[in-house]
Amino acid sequence: MEIGPQMLTRFEYARILGARALQISMGAPVLAEAQETKQQRTPEAVQEQGDPLLIAEQEIKKRLLPILVRRTLPDGRYQDIPLSHLLKQSGRKHGRIITN
């Protein structure tokens, strides 16, 4: 890894959590195992399943999201890093970031 810290920053975590929670609230399929019993994609089904933020946080903790974090330098160069790699390298306790 060449650009940035070897762990997920709190800003990246917040953006990923918010984006995934929005997707879930709009009816995207839930990837967490505990929620697989109800795979209806209607907004009513999402409300029955629970809070989208909690579901998104569970998906991040279980490393289920196929998301890339793009880190960009001022000169325009960038590096795409898989979320699962950043979670392996991070100093995280109980799903919370403890650095920065």
Image: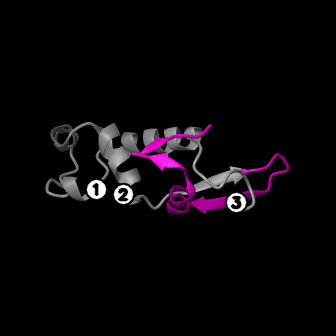
Local packing at callout 1 (Cα closer than 10 Å; few below 14, some 14-19, many 20+) is: some
Query: Relative to residue 30, is residue 52 depicted above or below?
Result: above
Residue 31 placement: quadrant: bottom left
Question: Which residue: 44% across, 42% down?
Answer: 17
Query: What label sits on residue 79 in the rendered view?
Result: 3
Left or right of residue 29: residue 8: right
| Cα distance between the residues tagged 1 and 2 | 8 Å
Query: What label sits on residue 62 in the rendered view?
Result: 2
53 is within the stretch colored magenta: no
Name the kind of residue labelled 3 in the image: Gln
Q: Nearer the viewer, mark 3 or mark 2?
A: 2
Question: Which residue: 44% across, 38% down?
Answer: 18
The magenta region covers: 72-100
Left or right of residue 89: residue 58: left
Name the N-terminal-most of marks 3 and 1: 1
The picture places residue 48, in percent across and down from the top left corner, at 15, 40
Residue 36 placement: quadrant: bottom left
Query: Relative to residue 56, is residue 100 depicted above or below?
Result: above
The picture places residue 98, in percent across and down from the top left corner, at 53, 40
